[in-house]
Amino acid sequence: MASEAGGVSPLRRPNPGLAATLSIVPGLGQLYNGHPRKAVFYLCWTLFTIGPAVLLIMAGQSIGHTLLVHHSGALFLLIALISVFAFIGLFLAGLFVWASSIIDAYQSAVALGAGERELAARRRMFRL
């Protein structure tokens, strides 16, 4: 009963490897660990960075084709340059949040297994 004294029941010791694997879908590892607010945070931030990046490239292709048809090469290059930099920034931010989700799920599961619920509840962002 020593594990119950630490505040974590023997049935609720999440597997860190499984938590990290589930985080391939951002937020799923946090749900597995019992942190729904963190799950929503990671899911939304991943979707709101990678999603617009993909939409930007798709819209940019359409706009670029129209500009080339109308022989506006200079404007095409300017818009292409801006959209590529915006895409790279948004996409890298999304990958950063996604990687943070995996790391957070793993570290939270380890903390929960050690009985440190307060440490597990903190949000962790990947540090370079």
Image: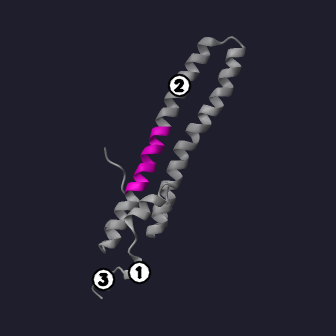
* Count of labels in the image: 3
Q: Is residue 51 above or below residue 123?
A: above
Which one is nearer the viewer's eye here, 87 or 2? 2
Residue 123 is a magenta residue: no
- Quadrant placement of the C terminus: top left
Query: Which disc, if any, is residue 82?
Result: 2
Q: Nearer the viewer, mark 2 or mark 3?
A: 3
Q: Residue at x 41, y 77 (%)?
A: 12
Residue 98, position in %: x, y? Answer: 46, 49
Q: Give me the residue at 58% from left, 40% from top.
A: 52
> In whole angstroms, how far apart are the C-alphas of marks 2 and 3?
56 Å
Task: Tell me the chief SS of the magenta region.
Answer: helix
- Name the amino acid, label 2: Ile
Which residue, given by chain and number where applicable, does mark 3 sit on? 3
The residue located at (58%, 22%) in the rendering is: 79
Magenta stretch in the rendered image: 91-103
User: How far is disc 1 from disc 3 in space, using C-alphas?
Assistant: 10 Å
Other-residue count near label 2 (Cα within 10 Å), few / some / many at <14 / 14–19 / ≥20: few
Q: Secondary structure at mark 3?
A: helix
- Is residue 122 visible in the rendered image? The answer is no
Please state which amino acid type lies under the numbered disc 1.
Leu
Q: Quadrant of the N terminus?
A: bottom left
Which residue bears the numbered disc 1? 11
Q: Which element is circle 1 on?
A: helix
Q: Can you tell which of label 1 and label 2 is closer to the viewer?
A: 1
Who's the residue at 51% across and 49% down the image?
Answer: 46
Q: Pinpoint residue 5: horizontal percent, then vertical percent.
A: 29, 85
Q: Is residue 21 above or below residue 77?
A: below
